[in-house]
Image (tube, rainbow, N blue to C red):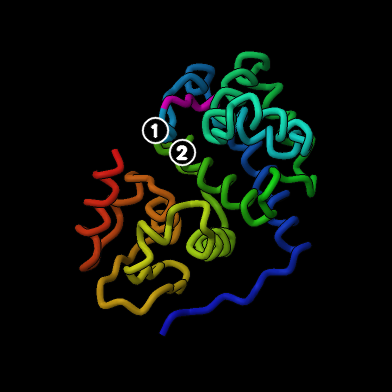
Amino acid sequence: MPLLMSKPDHQSVLADVKTERLDLCLWLEQLEPSDWETPSLCDAWSVRDVVAHLTLSTRTSVLDFVKGMLRYRGNFERMEAERASARALDFSSAELIEQLRAHAGSAAHSVGSTPLDALSDLIVHGQDIARPLQRVRPTSPDRVSLALDHVLASRWYGAKKRVGDVTLRATDTGFTSGTSDAEIHGPAIDLLLVATGRRAGLDTLAGSGLDQIRQRLDQRG
């Protein structure tokens, strides 16, 4: 039987977002200058670009969003990519960290999103940065499970199309989603990466549904 997570309290999610931002800031301060220019798991984005992107969610008003969508003719992904790249050029690594820290407790979030999206974004992008650097980016298993549950239910991440017909079982948290005989299991953080389209999560996973998921991720690229 699938493990069903209860709906999280709004304030507790905001507290998780704040903690995740502050933890990420401390982690980023350990990076070498050259690390910031390393390509991340996100196509065409460096580590610096990813961090710049993370500073934007609390700094984009509804008016800014509307103007941006008009400018980029409704292409949200292109708008986000170019805004992040521009911000990465305008600020130093230390400045980007301080911007993330200064808004750590902010309840502001991107238009059309929720605090759970902010939490998921922080956790996944933390891995987008850490994996290419061959560094460990630890995150609370409870927060990872919360993000995974949200991503699987959301229509924005493509997770339903990617893994919706496969049972996911986290071996480190007890999280389970789905009732299919086809299953993939492993650490919750790697299930989250695969659910959001990252091949980097595949190496630690196993199960009868793994080849099927691997093929889907290969077709994407």
Element marked by disc 1 = loop
Q: Residues within 10 Å of mark 2 (few under 14, many from 20)?
A: many
Looking at the rendered image, the quarter that the N terminus falls into is bottom left
Q: Which residue is mark 2?
A: 128
Above or below — where is 39 with respect to 181?
above
Q: Are marks 2 and 1 in contact (CB under 8 Å)?
A: yes
Q: Amino acid at mark 2?
A: Asp
For this rendering, which residue is in front, 143 or 178?
A: 178
> Is residue 30 something that shows in the picture?
no
Chain part drawn in magenta: 44-49
In the picture, measured across the screen, residue 82 lies left or right of residue 7, that is: left
Which amino acid type corresponds to the residue marked 1 in the rendered image?
Pro
Which quarter of the image is occupied by the C terminus?
top left
Q: Is residue 48 magenta?
A: yes
Q: Is residue 189 magenta?
A: no
The residue wearing badge 1 is 132
What element does badge 2 sit on? helix
Using the image as rendered, state which of residue 21 and residue 45 is in the foreground. 45
Q: Is residue 95 left or right of residue 82?
A: right
